[in-house]
Amino acid sequence: MNKIGIAGNCGKEDRSDCQVILELTESGGIQVELTSKVKRLYGKSIEADCRKGLDFFGIVNALVKINDNGTLPFTLAARIEAAVKQVFETSAEFLPPFLPQNNYSTARDCWRRARLYLPGNSPKLTINAGLHKADGFILDLEDSVAPLKKEEARLLVRNTLRQVDFYGAERMVRINQVPRGLEDLKFVIPHNVNLILIPKCESVDQVKQVDNEIKRIANEYKLTNPVWLMPIIESALGVIRAYEIAIASPNVVALAIGLEDYTADLGTQRTTEGRESLYARQALLNAARAAGVQAIDSVFSDVADLEALQKAVQESKALGFDGMGCIHPRQIKVVQDNYAPDAAAIDKARKIVKAFEEAEQKGQGVVALGSKMIDPPIVKRALRTIKLAESLGLLNANWREENV
Amino acid sequence: MKPELIKNAAGRLVPRIINDQEQIPFQGIGKFRPTGRKAAPLIPTCIDFPADGRKIVPDLKTALQKCGLRDGMTISTHHHLRDGDLVSNLLFDTIHEMGVKDLVWFPTASFPCNAPLIPYLEDGTINRIEGSMNGPLGRFVTEGKMHGTAVLRSHGGRVQALQDGEVKLDIAVIAAPSSDPFGNANGQSGPSACGVLGYAKADYLYADKVIVVTDNLVDFPNLPMEVEGNYVDYVVVVDKIGIPEKIVSGTTQITRSPDRLMIAELTAAFLEQSGILHDGCYMQAGAGGTSLAIGYYTHQILRQRGWKARLAFGGSTKYMTAMLEDGSLEHILDAQAFDLEAVRSIAKNANHYPYPVFNAYNYHSKGNLSSMMDIMILGATEVDVNFNGNVVTHSDGYLLHGIGGWQNCLFAKCTILPIPSFRDRIPVIVDNVTTLCGPGELIDVIVTERGIAINPQRTDLLDKLKGSSLPLVNIRDLQAEVERICGGKPDKPDFGERSVAAIKWVDGTVIDVVREVKV
């Protein structure tokens, strides 16, 4: 029997996806059998795209069955490529066009209050995700992707990076654990990823391996946009080594903590109060601050309870964290609003920025507020607070004219 | 022979004759004026009715026989029991058993529960449906399998057709959750309680014969008399008129879809920033998941601002009764109770008042509630770049929804369609709607997850929102973005020659037809 390639999903819940079953044949050209609820409207287009994909890989005789549930073209292309790659080995890549608006870079200290996790192999969740205005979107190749689906997920995430508009949010990918994750990088780095999350990170070496592989790919493809790193600490050992990890590469911009795995590693369970993880969170936070990077808290898993989320975020902010992962779009606004600076912080930032601007006008090198000297990083932070407060509508753009 | 087609004022080709009746093509909004007098039913005399007021007959067959049922008659049912209705199917089972043929079924709406009627459409017991079609019946009709041509009317258009004599109703069969032996009926109590019987009023006023079918016979007088026994010929008592869990609509939960919640939030923000939502406003309410979410967000705004809405009209739900109870809303005029909380509220709150569509939507009348509404939230399967709307067919040409009150509601001061910009790869914003149900000049705003498109004719709204933080977009840019995502424009379905359904405008003229789809 001929080798058969099967990719994608066609369950009732798998909207915007399809399953492609590809069987190479000896003769008879390309036969496409399509089942689709949009067949009357896009049947011809689906068939044409399918033929284009097979033609790209030089396949002239094959039977292709497509069971479609409203797939968009970039997903179909990924599914066809995945099926082809199960049938024979090829390093050729069938790429959809790269949306020009997706070509941007992010600053090392940009806001990372709310980052939405998107399972890398579930297209229905990614298509409109950008509309929900998170600070970042994490296309996940790790825990949300079943082991047997890892290969096809890489192709889909790659196509998602090229085709889905994230409206300026930071484009992130969570790769698999090193060393497997190193292979993931080849599929995503050339397509303008802004940040890579390194899961279950517990050594400097893991960070360096990722960093070096990214450098290698960036050189190969002549990429210029920075690719930042966010190691996720998810074990007792990781917590102990948090500081070393944070300074392992200048590209590390944040440390994140993953409490599900961490508490399992401790031999306990997560509780709402979180006493079991307080040490780890504070240790991670301290390490992050010592290394001059952001500290990102673990996700809040009850998506229905936004009030409890709000409390959790307020507490997290009080501990010093800069942001939290989100697992549902509804969490984004709550997380963003509650990590936003409060009135006292905005007020302090206004005073610092005013003092800084006055000192600049007078040509003074040193900024002072009252009798206190203000260091440049504090000015920088105050400027960011003001910028954020303005963008959140917490502060009028003409605040300089208002009386403090 | 090819049917004679005429181009109507909306540029759509429509037949001059449908089901042997001469039609008036759509002439433009507010252009057609009817003349003459209202239609009237037969005059009865009380000497033909039992002096003790007991109009009960043993079964539906006897009632139909006494009504003089014969081939070719028009017979109506009403959808207040929604997908839990058992009476329409019982009715046609009985008629089939009696061997009567060629009937016109004139329901206020049909539901998937009516799929068992398909064999009766095949064997000619029913010649055609004049009413909205959902699910399997819509599919059957679209594929050209029904003998006659379907006629789809809005709720108001249906009242108007009875009143104007365009439809002569022979027998109305009203499923009643409670009735007394005289035929005084309401929807508020009994095992199949559904709240209000808002759709049946025109039918009992204009039908020659009226049969009330109930599973809950109570002593005279049954109050309130939503259906007045004086108009009723026979009362039939059966075991069960409905399946309670299916009477309550399946759509009365706030959506959990993040995209739809976003559309709802944008809609509420639009209402607030445009000033359309204000203290004392009149708002319409629907029971779709997005519509309920809009209700939820507007409720928050009313509370924050300390405003009260004067009136909500439409289908009532627990979300609306909560507004009534906390004082954010002063009155509900109710055409249809969608959940049990609403059913209870009608029975206990005098400001929650049954208000039949009869009073709200008839275009040939002395004024309508719909044009008084400040806020109107409606849905659509498609909207085109000229803001024309389609609610009855999908882009593949299949008839899958009824018009309901949609056309009537377009006359509100601001009509807003909160809709996703595409569904399952199918763009909702199109060049030309597959079936024209509502002209673009009556559709003011489209709110999608990708931004808000305001009809360029509403310069007042555009001026008011200039410089606002709302994501305003041009509808053509929106269309281009959606087509980019969906991989180009969809193909057109393969239509045959035959018109399988006529779409009436609110004034009784023909605005469009649905063509047979070749399978």
Image (cartoon, coloured by chain):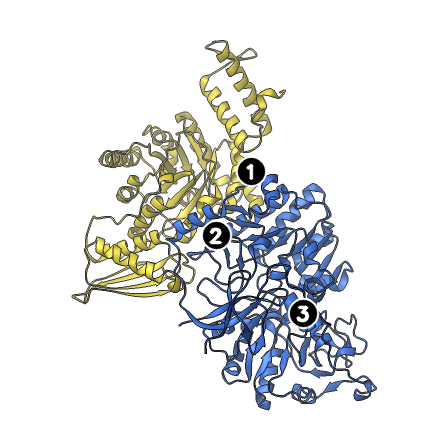
Q: Earlier in the sequence, mark 1 or mark 2?
A: 2
Residue B164 tag number? none
Residue B408: give x, y in percent of width and height: 64, 61
Residue B204: give x, y in percent of width and height: 72, 76
Q: Which residue is mark 1?
A: B469
Q: Quadrant of residue A292?
A: top left
Considering every residue shown, the one lying at the far right of the view is B51
Kind of residue at disc 1: Ser
Name the chain under label 1. Answer: B
Labels 3 and 2 positioned on one and the same chain: yes
Q: Which residue is mark 2?
A: B421
Labels 3 and 1 positioned on one and the same chain: yes
**Residue under the point 43% across and 50% down:** B482
Residue B159 tag number? 3
Q: Secondary structure at mark 3?
A: helix
Q: Which chain is yellow?
A: A
Kind of residue at disc 2: Ser
Look at the picture and state if B333 lies above or below B90: above
Q: Quadrant of the N terminus of chain B?
A: bottom left
Kind of residue at disc 3: Val
Labels 1 and 2 positioned on one and the same chain: yes
Q: How busy is the neighbourhood of tag 3: few (under 14 within 10 Å), some, or many (20 plus)? A: many
Q: Is residue A198 left or right of residue A51?
A: right
Name the chain under label 3. Answer: B
Look at the picture and state if B378 lies above or below A178: below
Q: Secondary structure at mark 2?
A: loop
